[in-house]
Amino acid sequence: MAEAGRQYKAGEQRALLIATCLGSIIGPLLSTMMNLALVHIGAEFSVGSRSLALINTVFFLASVVFIVPMARYASIKGMKRIFTAGTALICVGALFAAFSPTFLFLLLMRFVLGVGSAAVVVTSVTMVAEVYPLERRGWAIGFNTMFAYLGLALGPVIGGTIADLAGWRVLFAVAAPFAVAALVLLVRFPGEVMPAAGEPMDWRGSALWGLAILFTMLGVIEITQSYGPLMLVVGLVLLSVVVLVLSRTPAPVLDVRLFRRTVFRRSCGATFMNYSATYAVSFFMALYLESIGGLSASAAGFLMLIQPGVQVLLTSRFGALFDRIADKRLLPTLGMALMCVGLAGFEFLGTDFQLWQVVTIMLILGLATAMFAAPNTTTILSSVPPHFRGEAAGSLAVVRQAGIMTSMGLAMACIAVIMGSADNLSPATYGAFADVIHLAFAICLGMCAVGTVLSWARGNILPQC
């Protein structure tokens, strides 16, 4: 573990925090930059909106498959080591993605980038939680989360501008400076963070987990195809088997006993509902602004800066506020309730583009997400003993990525149900695309309402470790 009882110096804490922040910005950048390049990619490879959704879907599919084994392996072998390997893998994947000869090859490189991102995501927040004491943990996690939102904020602007001026392939070069800076700073952090040092790696559980998640998520993505429901059923059956196997394994890849803790379980449930309800916002908004809104990629990118910009400004503040307030349910639950209001705004979007509607929705969602994210993450990581923080971070990342996958699967299913094979965006299909948005976000609103209930029902048990 992070050398038991050691008090880290302020400079060491700061070096680690900034390194993990720079690493955390890469995944969101590579995700949201692509949203503003989708129209360009679709034109070059002659693919429609449903196929374009796969660009982000395969990225997160790789993350959710590898994130649990990665969390366990990092806990045993060292968080710092796996963070470094993941950052290097992102650099390699981005380089090859920039020279993609076909759409299929681009999807393969996005999968590789998802694996690297899984390594960075699952180690970043765990190292921060290990090194910072409880009284400053909310602020530190909030600061780390703020940088992820900074990636979300910069992504549309950078993506739209570069896609218009230099082409979508150049976007992959943006990750390199952040990766190099993160690795340089990490050198200044001494030692390793190994919460489960010396324990065995559960390779059998890892393989079963990967298969179960792969079938389940592919079933969600292909739910409108004849084989989709069957894949989903197989995946859910495999997940049940995985839970049974892991509960009987002495040192499992994921300790499912963590979910017996009410605060942990319901906080993770709120996270899943949050991401299921909101991740597709950037996908739909990018397509909406560039098609029905008639904006260029760069103009749409600057407009989409509003939501993550609010998150960047306020996330660390709400993280610090969470450290001081007594009722730990208040901020995350209020954030989820406010999200419901923002998501309801999508029901009023139509083919008659109104700028004020878009701005209002993004302002509300930005404030809501800032209010929810850091307090909920801090609650999850502080609700388990330090020995299990790596697995807790892995579980958090899994439910978050599973939520993202569900959100993108829902987006693809709604497109398939309403637009069918005519999924290329043109004036003739704008009305149908608006109907897709209405259906998708009506479902998202329901999921967000469930998340609000879960957030309040977690109880007000104060973190003790």
Image (tube, rainbow, N blue to C red):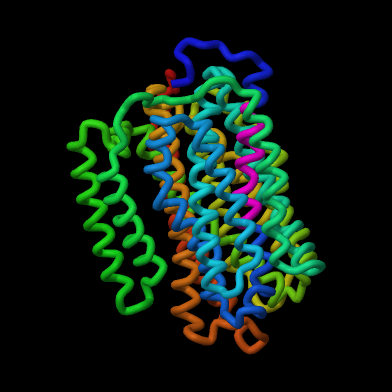
Residue 24, magenta (yes or no): yes
Report the predominant secondary structure element of the magenta stretch: helix
Magenta span of residues: 16-31
As drawn, the residue found furthest toward the right would be 165
Residue 328 picture location, percent across and down: 49, 28
Residue 405 picture location, percent across and down: 45, 58
Viewport quadrant of the C terminus: top left
Relative placement, left or right, of 164 versus 133 is right
Q: Residue 13's quadrant in the figure?
A: top right
Picture layout, residue 361 above or below residue 142: below
Is residue 309 something one can see in this rendering? Answer: yes
Relative placement, left or right, of 88 versus 395 is right
Q: Residue 165's quadrant in the figure?
A: bottom right
Residue 126 picture location, percent across and down: 49, 31
Residue at coordinates 55% horizontally, 40% vertically from top-left?
A: 372
The answer to which of 201 and 331 lies nearer the viewer is 201
The answer to which of 141 and 460 lies nearer the viewer is 141
Residue at coordinates 56% horizontally, 43% vertically from top-left?
A: 335
Is residue 364 something one can see in this rendering? Answer: no
